Amino acid sequence: MIQIKNLHKSYKMGSNSLHVLKGIDFSVEEGELVAIMGSSGSGKSTLLNILGMLDGADSGDYVLDGVPIENLNETKAAQYRNKFLGFVFQSFNLINYKNAMENVALPLYYQKVGRKERQEKALKYLGQVGLKEWATHLPSELSGGQKQRVAIARAMAAEPKVLLADEPTGALDSKTSYEVMDLIQKINDDGNTILVVTHEPDIADMCKRIVHLKDGVIVEDKKIKQVRASAYV
Amino acid sequence: MFNRDRWTEILQVLTANWFRTVLTAFGVFWGIFILIILLAAGKGLENGIRADFGDIATNTMFMWSQGVTKSYKGLPKDRNFNFKVEDVDALWDNIPGLRYVSPRNQSGGFQGNNNVIRGLKSGSFSIYGDYPEIIRQQPMDITSGRFINHSDIRENRKVAVIGTDVRKSLYDKGEEVLGTYIKVNGVNFMIIGTYHKSNANGNNQAQQDIYTPFTTFSQVFNRANNVGWMAITAIDGTPITVLKEQIFSFLKERHTIHPKDLRAIGHFDLFEQFSRVVRLFGALEFVAYFVGILVLLSGIIGVSNIMLIVVKERTKEIGIRRALGEGPWSIKKQVLMESIFLTIISGMAGIVFGTLLIYGINYVLDMNGPIDMFANPNVNLGVVIVALIILIVSGLLAGFIPANSAIRVRPIEALRSE
């Protein structure tokens, strides 16, 4: 699903540049649930941003679902993001003046799905995360866990190839974190490919594979036995 | 464009901060309001002055003979000369581009002796000898009967057309006028019509004239073939101001007058006066547009400013949208439409309020009767359409910089911003 070869990325910081990713080789098969771990500054968020086409690499190859991702202009990148990727953020990033259903329907709107079908789909995905009754509520009326579940429903609504989660549990207490991870595991069980960036070992243990990043290189890449979050809920 | 979701969003964004939106809108409102009011005031002035000209043929000059001031070909200076009836045909034959040439004679008038008698009543009026064409140069409404025609001219009929004030002083109310006789300087004339000049604006002499056929007038009042003065109208598109020098030199040659004798022929060029006024209106309109658009511009800068702030406030939201796959064009369009919507709504309010005010002014003017030099201020549909186009263009301009700044931030940076 994802193939990365010799990926480099550096940031200009005034006169000197900061080499963040120093040659990443990495691939993900369909249906995997991968945790990307590392301390802050290890380059894990940068990697996720490049995978999410929010940021461009300096050099290296990136192939997503057989499509080489290179020389993207913003319009093309937006189309690819919409078609291939779903994002879940640490700070939820819901649009605060739109209610839960409108938020979930947003990526469908960019796919030019009709209004009625959009609402049906949005309700369906809200139902899958158990928030159907909250469809007309604004984000400010939802708890942290609920917001993240809306965000996951939104990410799934466009039926992306890959779900990218950047510290999805970073702003949640541990009980809610497990609930969210339980949801992510269930989505993975349905065959979806998911990448989770985290620095919490217990969250990483709930994935099927852990990739360790340190100072811009992969130091460890291992498959693990998944811990089911449902055991903690 | 007609997308329900987009409009919902535009309304959501603009109503999120009512007070700010209204203040911003006021700038544009005020600009277009001023523009409309200024244009209407200019139009009111124009209407007022045009009413003074009335429907008089404006491409006209009046020309009369004065004393000769230069000796020429052995003829002395300080002699008098008269235009002759034959000059009229000569003008027609030699000067292209003429529309009407009316030779005229006059007697009486302006506080003269009582020169018109009917039975026991008498009055002092201006008597004109005229050709039928004069009614095209100095329009008047024939209220009963008819005006002089060419048969009257040919047959030297002693007929007359009188003004409403003449009728009032010589006839009793309700008395039949047509077919009766009045005695002008001892000669009987039959009344064939009455007239009223609608564009007299306060000139009480205007309804006190008596028109008779030119030929009759010359004959009975012993004017021979002399012509008092001429009213000459050129065809449309050929200004009489251009034609008049040709006419003067032609007539000077005919009457053996030094070509450089500028005082021999006196004239009044109505077209020149009229074009001066028209130029003044042009300048007024320019000033109105200039001031109005500058005021509008400051309103537009206000809108642009607010849109920049809105975009800045929504940086993170825009980042989220782009992460979800909204294209940069869609975002740009959103900002542009917000800006155009805001300008058009406030501009329309300006147009409506401006029009209401004009309506009010018109109402007051109607109630209090006419005012000199000012009548019926109005803006026509064309102006409103121009204003709307200005609004759309300015909305686009106002939104352009904010829209670009909205998509200039890279999505990753937009997402990081708080």
Image (spheres, rainbow, N blue to C red):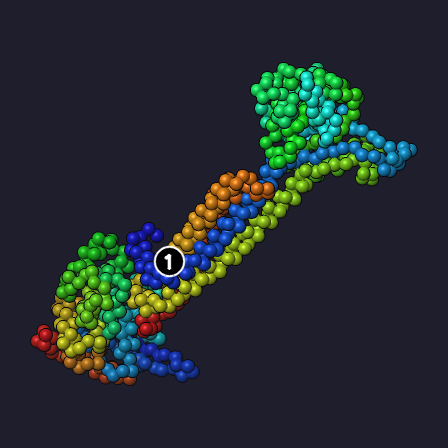
In-front residue for pair B313/A9? B313
Q: Is residue A36 above or below residue B366?
A: below
Residue that appears at 47% across and 53% down: B32
Please indicate whether residue B110 sits to the left or right of residue A199 in the image: right
Q: Is residue A221 above or below residue B41?
A: below
Position in image of residue A192 (x %, y %): 17, 67
Position in image of residue B203 (x %, y %): 64, 34
In-front residue for pair B336/B221? B221
Residue that appears at 81% across and 36% down: B264
| Chain of the residue where label 1 is placed in the rendered structure | B
In-front residue for pair B171/A77? B171
Q: Name the image quarter holding the C terminus of chain B.
A: bottom left
**Residue A7 in sight here:** yes
Crowding near pointer 1: few (<14 within 10 Å), some, many (20+)?
Answer: many
Which amino acid type is marked by label 1? Glu
Position in image of residue B397 (x %, y %): 45, 58
Please indicate whether residue B9 sits to the left or right of residue B254 in the image: left
In-front residue for pair B355/A145? B355
Q: Is residue A84 above or below residue A210?
A: above
**Residue B411 in sight here:** no
Residue that appears at 57% across and 42% down: B371
Residue carrying label 1: B338
Position in image of residue B18 (x %, y %): 35, 61
